[in-house]
Amino acid sequence: MVAYIIRRTLASILVLFGVSILIFVLVKITPGDPARAQLPASATPDQIKALQHAMGLDRPLPGQYISWLSRALQGDLGLSYQHRVSALQLVQERFTNTLILAGSALTVALVIGVSIGVIAGTRPNSFIDRFLTLLAVAAASVPTYWLGIVLLIIFSLKLQWFPATGMYNPRVDPTLPDLLRHLVLPTITTAAVPTAIIARMVRSSVTETMTLDHVRTARAKGLAERTVVTRHALRNALPTFVTIVALQAGYLLGGSLIAEIVFSWPGIGLQLYTAVGARDIPIIMSVTLLVAVIFVSLNFLADLIQAVADPRIRLA
């Protein structure tokens, strides 16, 4: 087990290193000059060159990356070009808001997705199986931005059941009921695709495990169907389920960008969107690197759980 953990740790570090290089290069080759974006339109070429030198943008790309990486390993991701404060601090402040939205969406996706998957998987090829599978395919096919706009128009602008934007009502003191009302539409928008994916994967895994010998034996012994499903079928589907949850959690933490833009939810997705428009490289790097670290960490944790649940994985 120790050797497996060491291998997975080294692999995760290499992945993060490769991701950091990829993100850095992509940001640097994106059209636009960060120095020019910080100066007024009347700035002279000499002023632009002076700011480029001060920001280190005139150095060779490998040198810029090494300098950035050495500071990043010490927790210094630079100052935001827009706000002139620590980029990491700004991202951390917004990350809590994204975590609230992602946690809410993941809860909804797990409850509904697993329920649909189990119901469909225990009744393969039945009418309810085909109906729920069709419903999941339809949910996975709907573009997130379209769903968000439709929900906003119907339930906010037309029916006025829920707020259209923001996290709290700015005219009153923040309260939990107010937060929950603002959270409903972004949560539904964000959870739609993960719910469909979880439902389809759980359905496939449950359908497969229900045909195993030990499950048929449990049924032959006269055990209740609920006991057969929960103690035998779902237990064998646990490794697959853990992987799905880890992947979807990483997706939600980094993939709520659309919902945050549509509903003006003050999370890191909206922050990344505004930073890209302003060419605020420290913010862009901080957000993307944070999402990469979370995604890799969740997959690492999922691998460890799978290794504990199924010792054969350690030998792979």
Image (tube, helix red, strand yellow):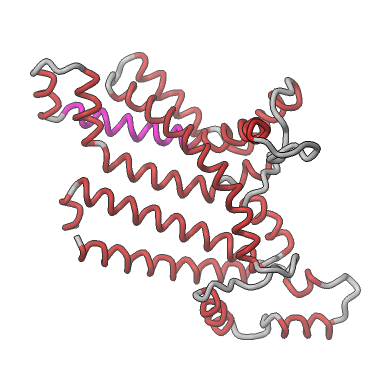
Taken as a whole, is the magenta stretch helix, strand or loop?
A: helix
In the image, is 226 to the left or to the right of 95? left
Q: Indicate whether 82 appears above or below 44.
A: above
In the image, is 39 to the left or to the right of 22? right
Identify which residue, 124 or 31, lies in the foreground: 124
Give the image location of residue 159, x and y in percent: 73, 20
Q: Residue at x 46, y 23 (%)?
A: 135
Q: Indicate whether 90 appears above or below 229.
A: below
Give the image location of residue 120, x and y in percent: 33, 22
In the image, is 21 to the left or to the right of 298? right
Q: Quadrant of the C terminus?
A: bottom left
Q: Residue at x 71, y 56 (%)?
A: 274
In the image, is 153 to the left or to the right of 306? right
Give the image location of residue 125, x and y in percent: 30, 19
User: Does the segment drawn in magenta span residue 242?
Assistant: no
Give the image location of residue 313, x and y in percent: 20, 52
Q: Indicate whether 316 appears above or below 15.
A: above
Magenta part of the chain = 194-211
Q: Is residue 174 visible?
A: yes
Identify which residue, 287 or 48, lies in the foreground: 287
User: Does the segment drawn in magenta span residue 199?
Assistant: yes
